[in-house]
Image: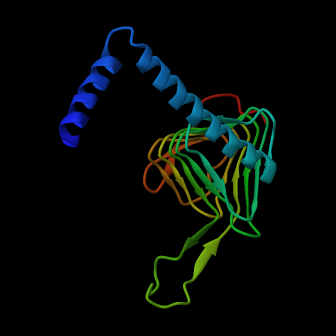
Amino acid sequence: MKRIAYLIFNRFFLLAYYYKGSKLKSFLEAEFINTQQGEQEKIYYGFRNKYSLDESFRFNGKFIQLYGDGIIQAGAGSYIGSFSTAYSHKNNKVIIGKGVRISHNVRIYTLSSFPDQDFSNPQIQNKAGDVIIGDYSWIGANVFINPGINIGSNAVVGANSVVTKDVPDFAIVGGVPATLIRMKKIDQKL
């Protein structure tokens, strides 16, 4: 009997939800979106209290994570996209310059393990290093930035790249690992 009541309720609920001009649909979507946005804003407010982010720094989307006991700084007019992560290990820092555009699903880490070791050994060797992204750089979607990397000012890192070496000012890099594609064809004023 409960199963039949559930099926009837479920059918009427779906009909009411999908009915053209449904007030139920607009109410539920408004409540869900407002609640979700409110939770994200609380999380982002916590990031602003913990790290040194310029007041004009934007969280450009959802599910962005800044974490770690190190320093994270972000300059004026910069933003970071949905699903991106920046981790700053203790005694390390992630510095994001001014006007930096970090796209969606970007990973920035200041600590990683060396690959050439026996991971069954409890004494894992790690590589740690600061990550510095210069002013007015653009980091494409799905980029992974390794520890100890400096990305120069006005540089471009193409989508789906893995950055394993420093990137010079005004360079366009891409690939796995990221390599120089070319230098920008503009006056290079800094």
Splitting the image into 4 quarters, where does residue 67 fall?
Answer: bottom right
Splitting the image into 4 quarters, where does residue 128 fall?
Answer: bottom right
Numbered label tally: 0
Residue shown at 81% from the left, 35% from the top: 55
- Any part of residue 105 in sight: yes
Where is residue 144? Give x, y as percent.
52, 54
Nearest the camera: 181 or 13?
Answer: 13
Instruction: Left or right? Give the position of 11 relative to 156.
Output: left
Q: Is residue 116 above or below residue 71?
A: below
Nearest the camera: 46 or 144?
Answer: 46
Residue shown at 31% from the left, 25% from the top: 13
Where is residue 126? Give x, y as percent.
59, 77
Kindly give the residue lying farthest to the top in the view shown: 21
Nearest the camera: 34 or 50?
Answer: 34
Q: How is the image coloured?
A: rainbow
Splitting the image into 4 quarters, where does residue 190 fall?
Answer: top right
Where is residue 109? Give x, y as percent.
60, 60
- Any part of residue 96 in sight: no
Kindly give the residue lying farthest to the front in the view shown: 1
Where is residue 124? Give x, y as percent.
54, 84
Q: Quadrant of the N terminus?
A: top left
